[in-house]
Image: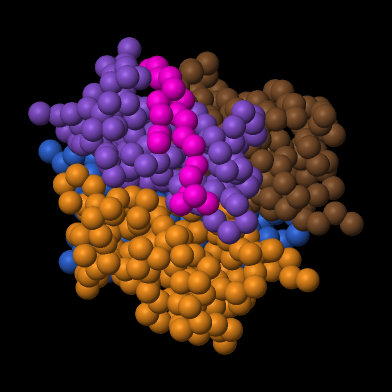
Chain colours: A purple, B brown, C orange, D blue
Amino acid sequence: MTVMTRTMLQEFLNREFPEIEHMGFEVAAVDDSSITMQMKTSAKDLRPGGTVSGPTLMSFADVTMYLLLLAQIGPVALAVTTNLNINFLNKPNPGKLRAEGRLLKHGKLLATGDVSIFSNDDTKPVAHATLTYAIPPQK
Amino acid sequence: MTVMTRTMLQEFLNREFPEIEHMGFEVAAVDDSSITMQMKTSAKDLRPGGTVSGPTLMSFADVTMYLLLLAQIGPVALAVTTNLNINFLNKPNPGKLRAEGRLLKHGKLLATGDVSIFSNDDTKPVAHATLTYAIPPQK
Amino acid sequence: MTVMTRTMLQEFLNREFPEIEHMGFEVAAVDDSSITMQMKTSAKDLRPGGTVSGPTLMSFADVTMYLLLLAQIGPVALAVTTNLNINFLNKPNPGKLRAEGRLLKHGKLLATGDVSIFSNDDTKPVAHATLTYAIPPQK
Amino acid sequence: MTVMTRTMLQEFLNREFPEIEHMGFEVAAVDDSSITMQMKTSAKDLRPGGTVSGPTLMSFADVTMYLLLLAQIGPVALAVTTNLNINFLNKPNPGKLRAEGRLLKHGKLLATGDVSIFSNDDTKPVAHATLTYAIPPQK
């Protein structure tokens, strides 16, 4: 049972993080253990040789895990990333990227998940990240 | 298409790594992108409070990724771990442990995968690791 | 013995990565095992509550390790990040950030280092990252 | 100001963790931000080719960070590892190993540090690990 729907997550993201609106992150689907996000790279996401920059992939992984967690605990919580580990696996093509997030643990203080990022409709990931968020105590 | 079957991997493990035979690692299933392993904890794997030690879980994750890679490239290669990142998620119970490995990338020089470890038949992992192996050049 | 000086690294960065010029990364010092970088956060690096965004810290760590490696191997090599692991330790203040990079290994194929990031002149890091770069074969 | 001395840490380790006494971990020095540990590999720590096994290095890194933390908070706390990231950098020689641990953050709930492991008196590390421990609430 999630406490935020796909639409609520999207509205929250647009409202609270206007500074990353240009990245065009879109929530495609979410449930109590997984999330699918999409984005489309633009010129500023690219590096010489036409590949997608590492920071763009890291931001995408981070926002994916963040929204997957908020879907479970709601928008009130000020969760922060404590650890991110990312492996860059294959050179991504410019264009559409898809992130698939899985919730591995949802504890009282810490939540951990992993995120696989794909180019377009590929089945082999271009990057894989594992992230831990600290959940602030609820009043 | 794997080049080593479940039985070949098991025989290789028993023959080449007699020093870890006491850990009782068993190959349950393997294919070209995943592997399932099993083990049973014994007294020396436990810590005060009855939980399974971190090094036991790390060894289990490491051997799981190692055999998943060897299934693809064969027993000749002297592959070595270059990076291991592990999150300890829940307190495992003594007894049976199951590891599910996924191959995320199989490149010429580097192979990366992740391994989720479960207590018995639980569906929530007790630990999750991501590992990279360096593959030595083939002659 | 480095093959690129502080000034050469700075010019290389400005010339090859104009898309991150707005981040204002500055090379303060470099030698054959360490590097010091500086940057000054601007509005787009900040998050609600006035803290510095994770992606800004990750970019800073990444460019620090990248230039530390290039100082050793020169600007010709197309090195790429294969793994980045970062721990966010303390809330950074907006303003000046300093990164201290150490080269832990410089192999033929892989180079690994770690980067500690500090607010202003603090001695306790706000973030700590470990990074591995793959070095492409030289012709 | 540490609350446990080198001798207290050593006695605690021997008393509470008899199952790893065979590894011969020794506390060489400790203060409020760092620790030095030593060990000597034996036959069971080695792998084909005479190198030290990954699990031995991971155990050494883990106990080093654990004791560095206990030196600050005392032996009562039941701290557990939540994340360990390790890079295997160079092939260690059998014989003496030295670990140098640094405390990067000591928060109320989480403590993070890194550990460099060296062969004998070498100055280039054979492995480097970053670890986070969860500190249980004090009553």
Residue farthest along the bottom direction in this orientation: C1
State the residue in front, B75 or A40: A40
State the residue in front, D84 or C65: C65
- Image quadrant where one finds the N terminus of chain A: top left
- A60 with respect to B79 (left or right): left
Q: Does C110 sit above or below residue A84?
A: below
- C89 with respect to A103 (left or right): left
State the residue in front, C120 or C18: C18
- C139 with respect to D28 (left or right): right
Q: Does B72 sit above or below residue C80?
A: above
Percent of width and height locating residue B80:
68, 52
Q: Is residue D103 visible?
A: no
Which of the 4 quarters of the picture holds residue D113?
bottom left
- Image quadrant where one finds the C terminus of chain A: top left
Residue farthest along the top direction in this orientation: A1
Which of the 4 quarters of the picture holds residue A62?
top left
Report the magenta residues as a range. Answer: A24-46
Q: Residue at x 54, y 78 (%)?
A: C71
Q: Is residue A30 magenta?
A: yes
Q: Residue at x 62, y 56 (%)?
A: A49
Residue farthest along the front direction in this orientation: A43
Residue farthest along the left direction in this orientation: A139
Q: Is residue C51 visible?
A: yes
